[in-house]
Image (tube, grey):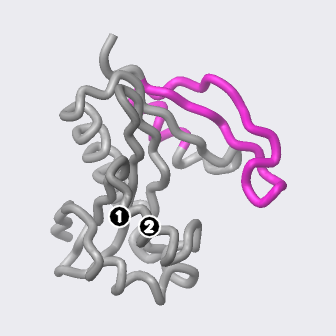
């Protein structure tokens, strides 16, 4: 499996927009993602296999801080290190932009993602009650890139 990571464009969004719910877990809809592509503070990347989108991720940057908005992998491609590749690329982007601290929220029940973030030295710094769908709590995590 040869995975290529590149910047997301409108063509990629068109490819995944009809499949968001069934194949990716619809965290955000097409309109929100399209707005993100237009946002100068936002950067989105995709993971491609044979030019087909199998995952995507985004980051918002403001001054010297950035927030990982999402890392999403197509259901059939999970547990194949694609999320890891996307996270590594987001960290590279943040470092290239001289980001000091990287933050994210993760569902308290998503042990796979929590363990991935801990592997990359993200630290738990708090919780948001009922953050996901008014039910599940979120763990707030941060990674210091520059001190």
Rate crowding at label 1 as few (under 14), some (14 to 19) or many (20 or more) other CA atoms within 10 Å: few
Tell me which secondary structure the magenta stretch mostly adopts: strand
Quarter of the C terminus within the rendering: top left
**Number of marks in the image?**
2
Magenta-colored span:
114-143
Q: Mark 2 points at which residue?
A: 35
Please state the horizontal and vertical placement of residue 66, each as a whole percent of the image.
41, 36
Rate crowding at label 2 as few (under 14), some (14 to 19) or many (20 or more) other CA atoms within 10 Å: few
Q: In this view, does 65 lie to the left or right of 93?
A: right
Q: In this view, does 4 lie to the left or right of 54?
A: left
Q: Does the magenta stretch include residue 95?
A: no
Q: Which residue is painted at 55% across and 75% down in the image?
A: 29
Q: In this view, does 16 lie to the left or right of 126?
A: left
Discs 1, 2 touching: Cβ within 8 Å: yes
Q: Which of 80 and 137 is in front in this view?
A: 137
Please state the horizontal and vertical placement of residue 145, each as a whole percent of the image.
33, 22
State which quadrant residue 57 falls in: bottom left
Q: Is mark 2 on a helix, strand or loop?
A: helix
Residue 41 vertical placement versus 146 (above, below) = below
Please state the horizontal and vertical placement of residue 13, each as a whole percent of the image.
35, 78
Q: Which residue is painted at 62% across and 50% down in the image?
A: 110
Q: Which of 132 and 60 is in front in this view?
A: 60
Residue 79 vertical placement versus 109 (above, below) = below
Q: Which residue is painted at 39% across and 20% down in the image?
A: 144
Q: Which residue lies furthest to the top in this view?
A: 147
CA gap between label 1 and label 2 equals 5 Å
Q: Mark 1 points at which residue?
A: 38
Residue 45 vertical placement versus 123 (above, below) = below
Residue 81's disc is none
């Amino acid at each position: 499996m040869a995975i290529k990571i590149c910047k997301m464009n409108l063509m990629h969004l068109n490819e995944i927009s009809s499949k968001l719910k069934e194949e990716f877990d619809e965290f955000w809809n097409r309109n929100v993602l399209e707005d993100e592509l237009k946002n100068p503070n936002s950067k989105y990347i995709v993971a491609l296999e044979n030019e087909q989108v199998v995952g995507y991720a985004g980051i918002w940057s403001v001054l010297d801080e950035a927030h990982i908005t999402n890392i999403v992998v197509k259901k059939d491609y999970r547990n194949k290190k694609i999320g890891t590749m996307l996270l590594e690329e987001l960290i590279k982007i943040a470092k290239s932009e001289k980001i000091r601290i990287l933050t994210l929220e993760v569902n308290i029940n998503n042990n796979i993602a929590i363990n991935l973030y801990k592997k990359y030295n993200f630290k738990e710094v708090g919780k948001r009650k009922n953050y996901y769908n008014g039910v599940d709590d979120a763990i707030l995590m941060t990674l210091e890139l520059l001190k």
